[in-house]
Image (cartoon, rainbow, N blue to C red):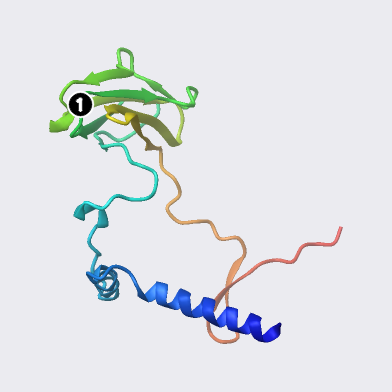
Amino acid sequence: MLRTRNFCAALLLASLGLAGCGGSDDGAPAATASAAAAGKPAADPGASGATSPGKPTAPISISYEIMSRPIVGQAVQINVKVSSAKGPVTVRYSIVDGSALMFQNGQVERLEIADPSEGGINQLAVIPQREGRLYVNVSAEVQTPGGPMIRSMAIPIKVGSAPQTPTINGELKEGPGGETVVSLPADEPH
């Protein structure tokens, strides 16, 4: 029985090793591995026409640029660029925390882009209500032969100044090997 287990384990390891060394006969895995080893980016497997076995991605691109410095109580202008090679796109803007961020009066929260292939820029204006990292959500929906597909992203808006250096708890001291260490006080017994 033990001999059979050892043989099965050896056979399993050998088949896994061969499977790991295998791949297609065109040498693509070896080329990708050598490109990665050389520090060069590997070619995108989707570029050759192969489809990913994972979740399909909406054929939409969303990018943004914050045009002004975010200040509490003042409108922040954001340029949002939505592009797609497919038909019309429906874009929606939303804010989850209305106490932290609100839309400027007259801001359109839903719009249709008839020709998204050119990637037109849309203006978005929000007003921060407090300091911190705030988010406005953008989602774009396009109709495909397989049904509607949506791409979403959250645009982070940093309002106010955060500390540039973290505060250090304890005291910096030199250790026995000459290295700098942080000495933390021991808790007092209660």
Q: At which x and y percent is residue 161?
A: 41, 42
The amino acid type found where label 1 is placed reads Gly
- Across the whole image, how many numbered discs are drawn on residues? 1
Q: At which x and y percent is residue 117?
A: 15, 32
Q: At which x and y percent is residue 168?
A: 56, 60
Q: Residue at x 24, y 65 (%)?
A: 41
Q: Residue at x 53, y 80 (%)?
A: 11
- Compared across the picture, whether 165 is left or right of 61 comes to right
In this view of the protein, which residue sits in the foreground, 52 or 156? 52
In this view of the protein, which residue sits in the foreground, 32 or 184? 32
The answer to whether residue 68 shows anywhere in this view is yes
Q: At which x and y percent is residue 110?
A: 31, 18
- Compared across the picture, whether 120 is left or right of 13 comes to left
Specify the quadrant that holds the N terminus.
bottom right
The answer to whether residue 175 shows anywhere in this view is no
Q: Secondary structure at mark 1?
A: loop
Q: Residue at x 20, y 31 (%)?
A: 86
- Compared across the picture, whether 106 is left or right of 122 comes to right
Q: Which residue is mark 1?
A: 87
Q: Residue at x 31, y 28 (%)?
A: 140
